[in-house]
Amino acid sequence: MILMLLIWLSCVPAEPLHCFGIARQHTLPRRVRAVERDEIMAMQAHQWSRAVVDSRILTRLRPRSLAAWGNLGNALKHLGHYRAAARALRRAAELAPASAAVRLDLALVYIAVRKWRSAQAQLRLALRRQPDNAQLLQLLGLAQLNSGQYHVAAATLVRARRSQPRPPLGLLFNLAAAQALSGQNHAARVTLRQLLYANPHLPALHLLLGDALLQQGRTRAAQAEFRRALALDPRLAEAQFELGMAALQRRRLAEAIRRYSAALWLNPACLRCRYQRGAAEVLLRQDAAARRDLNHTLALAGPGLRPGAVHSRVAALALYYRARLSLRARRRRAALADLSLAVRLAPGLPAPHYLLARTLAAGGRRAAAHRQFLIFRRLRAQRRSAGRFYASAFRRAAAASRTEAASTH
């Protein structure tokens, strides 16, 4: 009689999938059994290229073998051939749609190539079979965190923490990050305090705790945490950057510029550091240095920027501050070009809409300015003074327009 397929005994991603065990018919040809033995030995020895060759032979000899397709996908994944690995594992998923282990391994491939939505779909399918699996919940929370679903990620990671008595460090770290990014600052602080009690020498934990304190307006406490992180790792550019943000919040612009410069010395490719230094220089009226930093930021962000791109928000803010410099130099056309691009790149940022409305109103384009002010009011609806801000801005824009007209005659 033909035996049924065995369940995959392990789902630990770091281990080879040689445990995709399958019962064999007693009448299998000797060649197939020899190739299977060689495949398992290659995977146990982490000889992935040899395992790929053996697995491909097995998929031709036994095209409906779950073990062959699963092992092929796993070997290709270890070689970094993620697209081919995904194809092989999708074939394994077609052969065993209910296998949580196959779904898990396919999700790990998607996570490796940062396809967070596809990873989430596979992990949800796996969770239908194993709803309390801590590893699946942890990976799903990680995928949600990286795709910007902070509230959902925090809820998923709380479930993962409750499903195991001693949650790992990575799970708690991701949970604290999700809580901080979703605005649950008190919960993030509690989680981070637990982490710091057990791991007081990890700089990243002090950075996260400091960021949560900074979001609550507790600037001095945040600075103390950032300094602890810097004492643990003096070459940590992120700590210098966060100290710069804390100084900026306290309106200490010269100190903020000094901190951003230190961060750039440690990490010259830090886009946020260069943009924030340019913004602080604009506020300090160091116009030439600010323009250099903002232009460099936009060059680093890339020429093919589009809405939703990785650096679109930073680029939009850099354009906003460059437009402020252009208006300061009475270059309205250049400012309008920068602001129009900024509102396309990051339509959810209120500041570019407000400055664009003021610039349009000063140029006499009242209808277009009115539309931008309405967008600004919608984005800043939580501010009770939005109506007064709207009216006074028009008065300031009209006054600026009269002053400029008088100076040109």
Image (cartoon, rainbow, N blue to C red):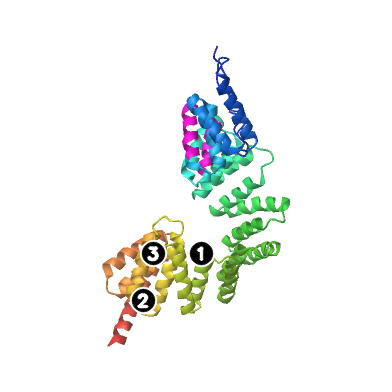
Segment tinted magenta in the rendering: 84-110
Say which quarter of the image contains residue 238. bottom right
Q: 236 or 349, which is in the foreground?
A: 236
**Label 2 residue SS:** helix
Between marks 2 and 1, how big is the CA–CA gap?
Answer: 34 Å
**Numbered mark located on residue 271 in the image:** 1
Query: In the rendered image, which residue does mark 3 sit on?
Result: 342
Q: 284 or 11, which is in the foreground?
A: 11
**Label 3 residue SS:** helix
Mark 2 burial class by Cα count in 10 Å: few <14, some 14-19, many 20+: some
**Label 1 residue SS:** helix
Q: 312 or 328, which is in the foreground?
A: 312
Q: 374 or 33, which is in the foreground?
A: 33
Residue 160 located left or right of residue 278: right
Image point (69%, 55%), residue name: 202
The kind of residue on which mark 3 rests is Ala
Q: Nearer the viewer, mark 2 or mark 3?
A: 3
Between marks 2 and 3, how big is the CA–CA gap?
Answer: 22 Å
Query: In the rendered image, which residue does mark 2 sit on?
Result: 396
Whether residue 76 is visible here, answered yes or no, is yes
Q: Main secondary structure of the magenta part?
A: helix
Say which quarter of the image contains residue 231. bottom right
The kind of residue on which mark 1 rests is Leu
